[in-house]
Amino acid sequence: MKVDGDAWQKWRQWVGIIEADLEKSVDDQAMFDIFRAVVKQNGAWIDSNEGAAFVDLVKRSFASAAFMAVRRQVKVRDRDAVSLLRLLTEVAAQSHQLTYDLYLKFHPLEEPDRWAWQRRVFDGLSEDGQVVSKRLIENDIVEANRLSDQIEEIADRQVAHLDPKGTEVKVTFDDLRTCLDFFDKLAVRYIRFFTGTSYTGDTMKARLAFDTHRVFRHPFIKPENA
């Protein structure tokens, strides 16, 4: 595979698909953390109002969505599917072609440019400043697989399919958060590399500008006198 304009454009398109998918999952995780904290602090009150079934529904719904979100990003064998790890696998295989000079052809410097983001972003995936490091990308792949391995197993055997063999694997909500947080930061690094887009704090997580607890202070059913 030659890294030319067509290959670069394909990877940029993949990055956009990956970003749209993961960004929603990252924001869902942030909202779910708020929900969990409210439930933990108000458990007795919620139970007294027979809210346990609803809480369980929210937990199961979030878990299923999160399991499948991780599963989508680690699949590499489906040639018709886009995933973060498929992107990294292709980039690692062609890393020897990704020199800084080639990078500047895709992202030309603007003159005069005192703050060349290209150098800083490129160096995030390079060890010598001249070519993208296959070792660094493969390290990212290894860590992503380590964090997602058990999550993917549950997603395959219990969420996407009803495997009669089942699984003995146990994954907590904290495990899910750790995995999604890593995928968030990992994706941002490659989104920035291919598009030049910058994120505050190296995360896709939105800064929520509204009162995130307001919905929990009011009943879903509108009072008659409201």
Image: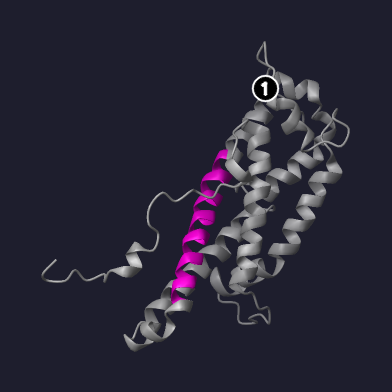
> In terms of depth relative to the viewer, which is nearer, 86 or 143?
143
Q: Which residues are magenta?
A: 16-39
Residue 74 seen in the current view: no
Location of mark 1 (residue): 107
Q: Position of residue 135 (x, y in %)?
A: 86, 45
Q: Is residue 133 left or right of residue 12?
A: right
* Callout 1 secondary element: loop
Please identify the residue farthest to the left as the structure is shown: 225
Residue 66 seen in the current view: yes
Q: Is residue 80 left or right of residue 44?
A: right
Res 162 quadrant in image: bottom right
Circle 1: residue type? His
**Residue 35 shown in magenta:** yes
| Colour theme | one colour
Q: Position of residue 59 (x, y in %)?
A: 47, 73
Identity of the residue drawn at 11% across and 69% down: 225
Identity of the residue drawn at 66% across and 33% down: 194
**Residue 114 shown in magenta:** no
Identity of the residue drawn at 57% across and 75% down: 158
Please identify the residue farthest to the right as the structure is shown: 128
Q: Main secondary structure of the magenta part?
A: helix
Res 212 quadrant in image: bottom left
> In terms of depth relative to the viewer, which is nearer, 170 or 113?
113
Q: Position of residue 164 (x, y in %)?
A: 61, 82
Q: Position of residue 110 (x, y in %)?
A: 65, 14
Q: Residues within 10 Å of mark 1 (few under 14, many from 20)?
A: some
